[in-house]
């Protein structure tokens, strides 16, 4: 399974999500904000997207309800 991880905290991604997914034999890409996620979604097909619900729209920008 190919997974897109949308998470702005590298420690959560590398120490938790990557370990779990790789132990199950899955491949993943990583986006740190919505802009990166949109670019990856436009260029690739994913079976699953795991997204932080408070992810900023752009790097170094506080998340908004949009």
Image (spheres, rainbow, N blue to C red):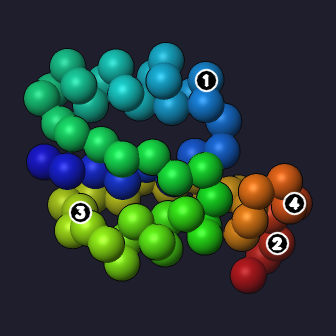
Label 3 to label 2: alpha-carbon separation? 25 Å
Whole-angstrom CA distance, mark 2 to mark 4, is 6 Å
Residue 64's disc is 2
Q: Residue at x 73, y 81 (%)?
A: 66
Disc 2 element? loop
**Disc 1: which residue:** 11
What label sits on residue 1 in the rendered view?
none
Q: Is residue 10 above or below residue 32?
A: above
- Callout 1: SS: helix
Q: Earlier in the sequence, mark 3 or mark 2?
A: 3
First reached walking from the N terminus: tag 1 or tag 2: 1
The span from disc 1 to disc 2 (Cα, nearest Å) is 22 Å
Could you tell me which secondary element the residue under label 3 belongs to? loop
Q: Answer few, some or many: residues within 10 Å of disc 1's Cα (few below 14, many 20 plus, some between 14 and 19).
A: few
Q: Earlier in the sequence, mark 3 or mark 4?
A: 3
Q: CA distance from mark 1 to mark 3?
A: 22 Å
Mark 2 vs 4: CB contact within 8 A: yes
Above or below, 15 against 58 in this view is above
Marks 1/3 in contact by CB < 8 Å: the verdict is: no
């Amino acid at each position: 399974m190919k997974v897109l991880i949308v998470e702005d905290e590298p420690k959560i991604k590398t120490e938790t999500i990557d370990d779990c997914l790789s132990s199950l034999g899955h491949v993943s890409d990583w986006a740190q904000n919505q802009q990166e996620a949109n670019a990856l979604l436009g260029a690739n097909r994913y079976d699953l997207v795991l997204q932080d619900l408070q992810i900023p729209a752009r790097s170094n920008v506080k998340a908004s309800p949009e």
